[in-house]
Image (spheres, rainbow, N blue to C red):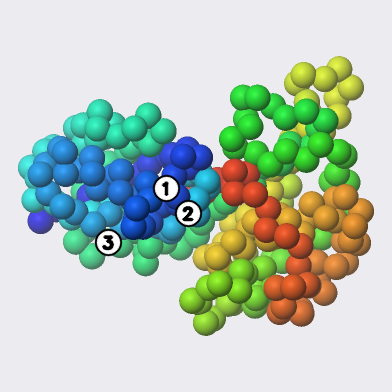
Amino acid sequence: MRNLRFTISYDGTAYSGFQIQPKADTIQFRLEQAVFMLTGEKVKVISSGRTDAGVHAKAQVINFSTNSKIPVERWCLALNARLPRDIVAHTAEEVLPSFHSRKAAKRKTYCFSIRSARFPDVFHRNYEYHHPTHLNVEAMREALPCLLGEHDFTSFCTVRTDKEVKVRTLYEVRLETEADELSTTGKIARIRLIVTGNGFLYNMVRIIAGTLIQIGEGKRPSSDMQQILEARDRSQAGPTAEAMGLTLWRVDY
C-alpha cells in the first residue's frame, strides 16, 4: 500500500462541506468517487480538517492509501480529469504510511474576506461577505491582540460541538485591507481577516469575524473582544458570519 498526500483547492459554494454525508454532495465524496473511477478502489480520503458547507479551500491537504502503481507525478492530472471543475489537485507526493493529514498538522491559516462597499463585486460574490456600509477598520484591529496566544475559546464556538476541550493557540490574527479598484475615492473596500492557529473550534473563525463586524459597525467597543473571550459564553459573542467569506488558506506540517 502507498500513502499519497495531495494539496487541493476547491470552491465550496455547491457542496455541503468536506465530510461525506448521507444524501449530500460533498468534497470528500467527489474525491473518493474520482479515485474509484481512476483505480477501481474504494479509498477513504483523510483531510487536514472538515470545512463547512459553502466554505472554500486554497490549499487543503488530504491523504489516502492505495494499491495503485500509477506514478505519483501523474496523479494530479489523472484526478483532475475526473473531478468537477470546482475541485483541483495541485500537488501529489508519496509519504510515510504513518502520515495522517489531520493528526500531523501543526498550524492552519484561515482567511475571512469582507467586501465593505455599497455594491457587491460580481467576480468575488461567492468568496466574500458583502457588507454594504462602512466598517471602522482601526477599531476592528484594536480588538484583535487579546486573541493571540493560548485561550479557552468557548465564546467563539458553536454550542453544537463534540469538542470538550476548547483551548486553542492563535499565533497570528491580523487584518489586511484593499482599496476599491472600481471607485475613484480610494476607499477601503475589501477587508481580510487572517488567522493562524494550532487548531480551530467549530465556526470559530466565522464567530470571530461576526463579532469583528459588529465592532466595525460601532455596535460594540473594541474592548468587548477581551470581555467576550473571558466570559467563555457563546451568547456574549457576535453572530456567525456567512460561510462564503471563509477560505482555508494554508496548512503547515
Q: Tags 1 and 3 in contact by the CB under 8 Å rule?
A: no
From the image, tell me which residue sits under label 1: 60
Task: Determine which quarter of the picture holds residue 225.
Answer: bottom right
Residue 134 found in image quarter: top right
Q: Secondary structure at mark 3?
A: loop
138 vs 201, left or right, is right
CA–CA distance in space, label 2 to label 3: 20 Å
Mark 3 crowd level (few <14, some 14–19, many ≥20, 10 Å Cα)? some
Residue 47 lies, in percent from the top left, at: 36, 56
Q: Which residue is mark 3?
A: 99
Label 1: how many Cα within 10 Å (few below 14, some 14–19, many 20+)? many
The N terminus is located in which quarter? bottom left
Looking at the rendered structure, the secondary structure element under dot 1 is strand
Q: Earlier in the sequence, mark 1 or mark 2?
A: 2
Q: Amino acid at mark 1?
A: Gln
**Which amino acid lies under the numbered mark 2 shown in the image of this protein?**
Thr
In screen coordinates, is 224 left or right of 62?
right
Q: Residue flagged by tag 3: what amino acid is it?
A: Phe
Residue in the image at 47% along x and 54% along y: 51
Q: Is residue 141 visible?
A: no
Q: Nearer the viewer, residue 72 or 54?
A: 54
Does 91 appear above or below 107?
above
Q: Earlier in the sequence, mark 1 or mark 3?
A: 1
**Is 183 located above or below residue 15 in the figure?**
above
Percent across and percent down for residue 105 are 41, 61
Residue occupied by mark 2: 51
Identified at 23% across, 57% down, the residue is 44
Cα–Cα span, label 1 and label 2: 9 Å
